[in-house]
Amino acid sequence: EYETWLGHGSVEKAKITLATQFDLVGITERMNESLVSLGKLYGLTADEMAVIGQSVPRDKDNSDTKLDWTDEEKALATYIANKSTQIYNFANEIFVRQYLVLFNNEENLKNAVERFEAMNP
């Protein structure tokens, strides 16, 4: 999907869009790091971001009821996601560059995430 929405079907155009049109490229699997980076971008501390954060209530969490993928489903999803995977990997590279600019080093980011998580478990 990334190539469709960001690059009109082109992986290279999607990468250019990510690199030039977004102040921050967040990564779902690194949500807390993305949130504290977003806060830093807008002048908010990790503590301030935690105050406005919200956890998913247990009654809304359906992760225990999801079925495992069949081999056929996984193979089809992998085939379909091939172009998007290239863009996703590039987005991860951009995210690392962006948080290094914002926090100067990975240790500072980790410290901010720890403060955020302590206030918003």
Image (tube, rainbow, N blue to C red):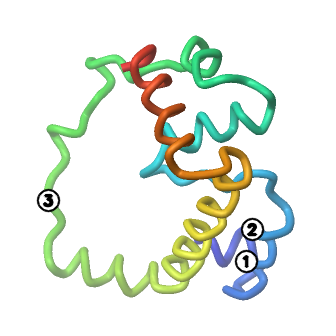
Q: Residues within 10 Å of mark 3 (few under 14, many from 20)?
A: few
Please identify the quarter of the rendering in which residue 38 is found.
top right
User: Which residue is under mark 1?
Assistant: 14
Q: Which residue does the image show at 71% across and 69% down from the upper left? A: 5
Instruction: Tell me, for residue 50, which label it has, or none.
Output: none
User: Mark 2 to mark 1: distance in Å?
Assistant: 6 Å
Instruction: Tell me, for residue 68, which label it has, or none.
Output: 3
Residue 109's x, y, as percent? Answer: 55, 42
Vertical arrangement, residue 68 with respect to residue 71, above or below: above
* Position of residue 110 in the picture relative to residue 51 (left or right): left
Vertical arrangement, residue 91 with respect to residue 98, above or below: below
CB atoms of marks 2 and 1 within 8 Å: yes
Residue 69's x, y, as percent? Answer: 18, 65
Query: What amino acid is found at the position of numbered circle 2 in the picture?
Result: Leu
What element does badge 2 sit on? helix
Say which label, 2 or 3, has the lower sequence index: 2
